[in-house]
Image (tube, coloured by chain):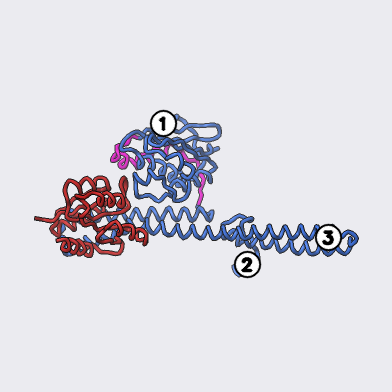
Amino acid sequence: MAKKILIIEDEAALQKTLAAALKSAGYGVLQALDGEIGLRLARSEKPDLILLDLIMPIKNGFEVLAELKADPEMKDFPVIVLTNLESIEDVDKALTVGVDTYLVKANYTLDEILAKVRQTLKEEQ
Amino acid sequence: MFEKRSIASHINPLYSCRRYGVSLWQCPQFLFLVMGLFSIIAIIAVWLVATSRISDPFLVVLIVLASGAFLIVMSFVITNSFERMAEASKMKTEFIGIISHQLRTPLTNLKFSLDFLLSDHFAQERSQQLEYFGILQENTKRMGDLVDSLLTISRLENNNVPLEKKDVSLERVASDIIAKDKPFADASGMRIILDCKPGLENVSADLLWLEQIVGNLLDNAIRYSKGGGQIDINIRRKGKMVLFSIKDQGVGIPKAEQKFIFEKFFRSTNARKKQVDGSGLGLYIVKRFVELLGGKIWFKSIEGKGTAFYFTLPVAR
């Protein structure tokens, strides 16, 4: 069965590109445009991997991470943070909460992100 | 000519002060000049007094002490002015940080869309490609808009925004902008109502500035709505001015943050929650423009209920 990936990203354009790329790589894709919908989908759909943006309306990525990690059912979902925040404090904050991979959007191509997704899913098996 | 001016400008402290954009009493070059002049005068005065009135040494001591005190105060003011300049330089650095981050979002969209369009791995149909070209177009515009705002700010701070005052109908500008923003308003479920007294006088303003002022205020009213509602625009005469008001039923501005709302880069907490994207430059530019055109701008806002912005502009003679 195709692995399910949840994308939580408020930039519609980026959301679309990521979803299309993941779908064509054979993954099932769930999409959320803000943190709150993202958490709801994570709870109900139990994705195999979450791609998470940090700066988002309603609930930001750090808030989403905190709730994910506080919930025993969701705390083990692998999370790749995909953001343009790259200050040491932000990276540290995310890594301490327990993020698997932290990617700065501006530094990666779509192919490289797909490779990270594959790698993270493989490690989880 | 150029040579001559540049030599003169090196000697003239007023020139450097203008270049740094600080007022005279905050400008180290000027303050040092004042202090230097005062020291010379003080020395001469003390010498004169000491030679002619040697009979009263008390007065000599007093003058020396007073000069000393003045020099101490001056040094303090000068040190302070250096701090201000350092502060200004720090703000510039922060400015660059914020701007780079804001340019990165559309840049990332461009990059990933291009990756997608150029890649062999992703199966694409023509219609799908067109969507990505649409993303490219939209984000190029976004970057362009941001760069435009930055240019405007830089020109405002150097006092050289091109200004061409003409008689302009504020009603005409408002209805043009409403028409232009209609798709955006419709998509957000907003109704815009323009109320203007017939036969209202023109205002004396620069058309491009006026479009930016009205466009920015309307854009904010739509952007920070609570998913639908009504925006009321009212234009009427008030004494020698024309008063423009725009009322929305949006998220409002928290009371504690109201005093910062016209500051460069400031965005209220609920605005940021509602809409992540935004430079915090719009209202700063609007205020500067209104004031440079001889008007005033103010607002009333209740968090959760809505905001009303008002501005006045002089009636064209």
Q: Are marks 2 and 3 on the same chain?
A: yes
Asked if B194 appears above or below B9 in the picture, the reply is above
Whole-percent x, y for residue B235 in the image: 45, 33
Q: Kindly indicate the quadrant of the structure image that contains residue A97.
A: bottom left
Mark closer to the chain start, 2 or 3:
2
The tint of chain A in the picture is red
One can see residue B259 in this view: yes
User: Which residue in the structure is indicated by mark 1?
Assistant: B195
The chain identifier of the residue carrying mark 1 reads: B
The magenta region covers B162-191
Mark seen at residue B10: 2
Tell me the SS state at disc 3.
Answer: helix
On what subunit does the disc labeled 2 rest?
Answer: B
For this view, does B259 lie left or right of residue B189?
A: right
| Magenta stretch contains residue B171 | yes
Magenta region, main secondary structure? helix
Q: Nearer the viewer, mark 1 or mark 2?
A: 2
The type of residue carrying mark 2 is: His
Q: Nearer the viewer, mark 3 or mark 1?
A: 3
Tell me the distance, in whole angstroms, between the alpha carbons under discs 3 and 1: 74 Å
Residue indicated by mark 3? B60
Q: Earlier in the sequence, mark 1 or mark 2?
A: 2
| CA gap, disc 2 and disc 3 | 37 Å
**Distance between mark 1 and mark 2 Cα atoms:** 56 Å
Q: Chain letter for blue?
A: B
x, y percent for residue A118: 17, 62
Q: Quadrant of the N terminus of chain B?
A: bottom right
